[in-house]
Amino acid sequence: MTKPVTFGLLVFPDVEELDFVGPWEVFTMSAEIHRGLRTGVPEPVSHLVGTVAGPIRCAKGMRVLPDCTLADAPPLDVLLVPGGVGTRPLATDTEVLAWVAARAATARWVTSVCTGALVLHAAGVSAGRAVTTHWMFADTLKAKGANVVRDTRYVRDGNLVSAAGVSAGIDMALWLIGQIYGEDHARAVQKGMEYDPAPPYGAG
Amino acid sequence: MTKPVTFGLLVFPDVEELDFVGPWEVFTMSAEIHRGLRTGVPEPVSHLVGTVAGPIRCAKGMRVLPDCTLADAPPLDVLLVPGGVGTRPLATDTEVLAWVAARAATARWVTSVCTGALVLHAAGVSAGRAVTTHWMFADTLKAKGANVVRDTRYVRDGNLVSAAGVSAGIDMALWLIGQIYGEDHARAVQKGMEYDPAPPYGAG
């Protein structure tokens, strides 16, 4: 690898916080590990790409500043579309959908977390391909004609990788980092973020 | 419970992104579950409390806007101090340490994630009490005289709950929500964020 891999994470009004910050932590920790271990691999670069300028109010109220806009986002190797209630208006926003379709056509990997899959579907990016989403929205996505896989953390179909709800984006992002930089590197990232999860009260 | 529980998550330059956004997602999802299920319990309220005004640049480059400052933060039932490289200057910042000590004295629960434990220690909040931190900083914290517990996701000692590195804050926050609202509610929050983690490449 001679060029840094560039990750673009879409952010929009009412995007779900952990949907994008989980993968953000994984991608940026990968950069830190490459730097710290002097792997010689160009550090990946991550951008929050805003559908609107200025502070973006997320689904649960956190306000974040995008790094760039749809218009000035750099070429992206990995496109990530998170979920959140804000995906509903996005799925009928022709400007955003055209941008997603165009960027998906040139990206090496196209990914979604949670209801971000609704946006990929609306953009025509996932047509005929296996996808997953938050368990509460599997029926909704299926009713739209999508090829929905249930009860999984993430699904890969070609260069399309979709994660289940919210926290599943962390598992998906780690898997993807392993595909790009190798499993040993992904394990080092996991160790850096001390990702040995132990939900305290068992299954929901 | 007749009054909403108020959570205050400290944010500061170079705070680690997932350290505070993981618990933020847990606390705010709890509010959504209370609202959605009409539990009748007043919805908890979460605030990002900035040590500085304006956009705060996190450790991995994400820029976030605090909801309030040290000076105008409301009374807090739960104080959360996240980690990140920004904890090092914080641990010698007398104004911030005095604020942390004062808020800790009146909070029902005092919590930290990752190297946030260094700040609680410097503020004198955790003196003599069992604490944990990111595995890379356990020796550092112990050398400062802290009572460090290793190889655990989180440790509770009285009203002090400290989590291990980065992602461990999610487990700690879910545990805490279970203590405050009961285990069934915590499981509903976990289900809402589809937290059935499955690290893709095994242990680090």
Image: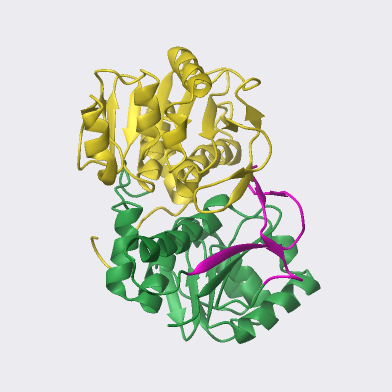
Chain colours: A yellow, B green
The answer to whether residue A200 is visible is: no
What x and y, as percent, mark residue B116?
Answer: 59, 66
Does the magenta portion include A142? no
Residue under the point 40% across and 34% down: A116
Q: State left or right for residue B150 relative to residue B117.
A: left
Whether residue A76 is situated above or below residue B40 in the rendered picture = above
Residue under the point 42% across and 73% down: B176
Whether residue A117 is situated above or below residue B151 in the rendered picture = above
Part of the protein shown in magenta: B44-73
Does the magenta portion include B65? yes
Q: State left or right for residue B71 relative to residue A91.
A: right
Q: Nearer the viewer, residue A87 or B168?
A: A87
What x and y, as percent, mark residue A41?
Answer: 55, 27
What x and y, as percent, mark residue B201?
Answer: 31, 41
Whether residue A48 is situated above or below residue B52 in the rendered picture = above
The answer to whether residue B94 is visible is: yes
